[in-house]
Image (tube, coloured by chain):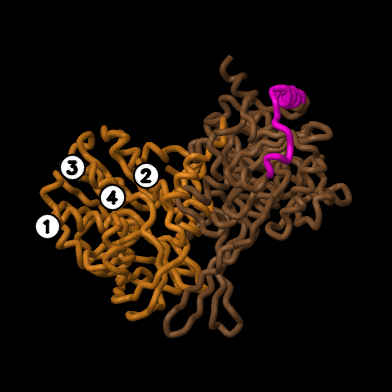
Chain colours: A orange, B brown
Amino acid sequence: MRYATSRIEESQEHAPGSFNPLKPMKAVLTDVRDENSDVKTYRLKVGDGFSRSAAAGQFNMLGYPGIGEAPISFSGIGEDGEIEHTIRAVGMATRFIERMRKGSEMLIRGPYGRGWPLGAAKGKDLLLVAGGVGLAPIRPVIRQIMKNRADFGEVTLLIGSRNDEGLIFTNEYSAWQKAMSVEITVDELVTKKPWNYRVGLITALLNRVKMKAENAVAFICGPELMMRFICRALLLKGAAAGSLSVSLERRMRCGIAQCGHCQHVGFFVCRDGPVFPYKQVEGLFDGLL
Amino acid sequence: MSGNGTTGGPGSRIFDLIVPKRSFFSWLDSLRGRFSLVGPVTEDGQTEFRELGSSHEMDMEYQSTMLSPGKVYLYKPREDLFRFSLGKSVEVREPETDQEQRVIIGLHACDTNAVRYLDLTFLGSFRDPQYAARRKNTVIISLNCARSGENCFCASAGAGPFLEGNDGYDMLLTDLGEDYLVELKSGRALELFPVDGGSPAGEDAFRFKQEKEQAVVHSFRKKLDMDGLNGLLSKRPDHPVWRATAEDRCLSCTNCVMVCPTCFCYDVIDEISMDLKSVRRYRQWDACQDAHFAEVHGGNFRARRTARLRQFTTHKLDQTHQYGVFGTVGCGRGITWCPTGIDITDIAKEVQKSEVGSER
C-alpha cells in the first residue's frame, strides 16, 4: 500500500493561509434559561454567517480560557445570528458555563461534524427518539419540521427521561404536539406533580408508534445503550438498517479530526459523525451499539 | 514539495546524480547559515536526530532512533496554540508560525512515510498552521537503508527499506560506497543542489540500487503478512490474545505511542497565570494507552487495558478506512521500546493463526 500524498498537495493549495482552525471566536450570551436543576439553555449571539452555516445535529467547541473546551451539539439554530446550546453541568467546562450570566462572553469554534440527514427524510415518515439531554440535538430537527411541515409524512417524537425532574423543554411540548405526535415516558416519578404521560422504558413507547417501520426514517439520540435497544427493536419491526441515524458522544479536544480522542474504530466521531448511520457503527468494539 | 513524477527512474538524467560523499557533505555544510541542519548523531550507542554543527557529526550508518525526526521537528511534543488575556473582554493572540529554515538529513524510508502519514492528519481536512509552516520550511533528504534492524518490518508494511514515490520529500540518497546516488525529487532540491556537483547516474547505478534493495529486503528477520490483515483484527475483538497480552504485560506506560512516528494524538491544556490575568493554551502529545484518554462524563469507552492495547494495535494494523493506508510504517520502535516486549506483529500473527484454524 502506498503512502500517497496527492490529497495533501490539493489541500495546501486551497487552504486559506492564515486560517487557524483551533482559534476560537467570541460569542455573547444573550439569554440563559433553566430547563431543570442541572440543565440550562444558553442563547448565544454568533453572527449571521455562523448560524447560517450550521446544521441540525452538528456541534461546537464551547469554552473559556483556563477552563478548556467541550463539544456541545446545537439545540437551536436561529436565522438571526443566534444559536442555542442546552447543557447539563457535569464537567469542568460545563460547570463553569453554568455560572455564566446574560451578557457574558464565551469562546466558540464550529460548526463541526455531520448532522442529521434531513434531506433524505423529506417525503417520508419520521420517527424521532430522544433520551434525557439527547433531546437537545433533536430540537433543531423538530423546529425545521414545524417550519416545513408539508415536507414530511407522519412525524412521531418519543421522549424518555430517567425521571420527571430530568425532562427538558417542557414548556414547548404543547407547541410540538400541533405538528407531530409526542409520546413521553419516564423511568420513574420523583416529584408529586400531576403526570399525564407514561412511566416505563422508552422502548415500550415503540408499540404506540403508528407509522410503518419499513417506510420510516428514524433519528435517535440518547445514551448508547438506549440507542442500541431502540435500533434493534426498529430493525425487528422491519425498519431498513440504512434508515436509522444515531448521534454519538466521545471525548473531544479539537473537533477537527486531529487530537484523536474521539476515534472509534477508525472513525473520527467529530468529523465523520457525531451523527452516523446506525449500520456504520453497529457492533463496533469500544462502543455499546 | 513539488515532486511531480519527473524523476525517479533509470534514464532521467540531470535529476539523478552520482555524487562523491565528500562533495555531498561539503555541499551540506555550505547550506549552514541559510538553514539549520538536523541529522542523525550517535552517542554512547544511541542515535538521535539533532542540530548539527557540521556534517562530520552525522552517523549515516545509523540503525534507528528512539524518536522519529518528523515528530521532533515537524509535529512537536509540545506546542503553544494561543495566549488569552482576560480582562473585560478576552483577547486571543496566536504565536507566529515557525519560520526557521531547516534541512533534515538521513530520514529512513519508514520515517519519511511517517511524515507523509502525519500530513494526512495535519494537512488533511483541517490544516494546522504551525505544522504547515514547518513542513514548508523544511527540506527533507531521505536515505535508503543499508540493512534491516532486529525489529524492523517496513518491508512487510510496504514502507521500506527503500523509499518509493516522489512526493512529500526533496532528495533521496542511496549509499554506493564512495558515492551517493542522489535523486532530486522537488523543485526546491533542483534549486539548492548544484547539478554539476556530480555525474549523471546511468542505468548501472539504478541496477546496483535495485540489487542492493533486494539484498536488504532479504535480510529482514521480522516479517508479517499484512494482506488480509485489515478487517481481520477488528473482526476478532474478543480474541484471547488481546486480554492475555494486555493484562499480563501491558503497563499502560504509553511508550509505544510516544516513540511511534505516526501517532498523532494530542491533548489541549490551559495553563492560567499566577495573577489570573492570562492563559496559555498549548497542546502536547497524548496517548490512547492513557487510562483517561477515552473518558467522558459517566463512562470510559476504553476503561480496560485490553481495550486500549486493541485500539493501538488495530490503529496500526487495521482500520485502514481512516486514511486509506495502514497506520504502521514498520519502524519497530513500539516493539523496541516496550518495557515488557509486547510485539504487535506477534499479536497479529496469533489472530491470523486462529483464523486459519477456524476455517478448517
* Contact flag, marks 4 and 2 (Cβ < 8 Å): no
First along the sequence among labels 2 and 3: 3
Q: Residues within 10 Å of mark 3 (few under 14, many from 20)?
A: many
**Is B234 above or below relative to A253?**
above
Q: Where does the magenta region start and end?
A: B194-215
Toward which corner of the image does residue A162 lie, by quadrant?
A: bottom left
Q: Separation of disc 2 and disc 3 at Cα?
A: 19 Å
Q: Separation of disc 1 and disc 4 at Cα?
A: 18 Å
* Circle 4: residue type: Val
* Circle 1: residue type: Lys
* Percent coordinates x, y for residue A262 in the rendering: 49, 51
Residue at far front of view: B196
**Is A195 above or below relative to B176?**
below
Q: Main secondary structure of the magenta part?
A: helix
- Numbered tag placed on residue A276 in the rendering: 2
The residue pinned by badge 4 equals A129
Assess whether residue B167 is covered by the magenta stretch.
no
Residue at far top of view: B360
First along the sequence among labels 3 and 1: 3
Q: Residues within 10 Å of mark 1 (few under 14, many from 20)?
A: few
Q: Residue at x 22, y 51 (%)?
A: A157
The residue pinned by badge 3 equals A125
- Numbered tag placed on residue A178 in the rendering: 1
Q: Separation of disc 1 and disc 2 at Cα?
A: 29 Å
Chain letter of mark 2 equals A
Q: Of discs 2 and 3, which sits in the foreground?
A: 2
* Percent coordinates x, y for residue A105 in the rendering: 39, 77
The one nearer the camera, B81 or B171, is B171
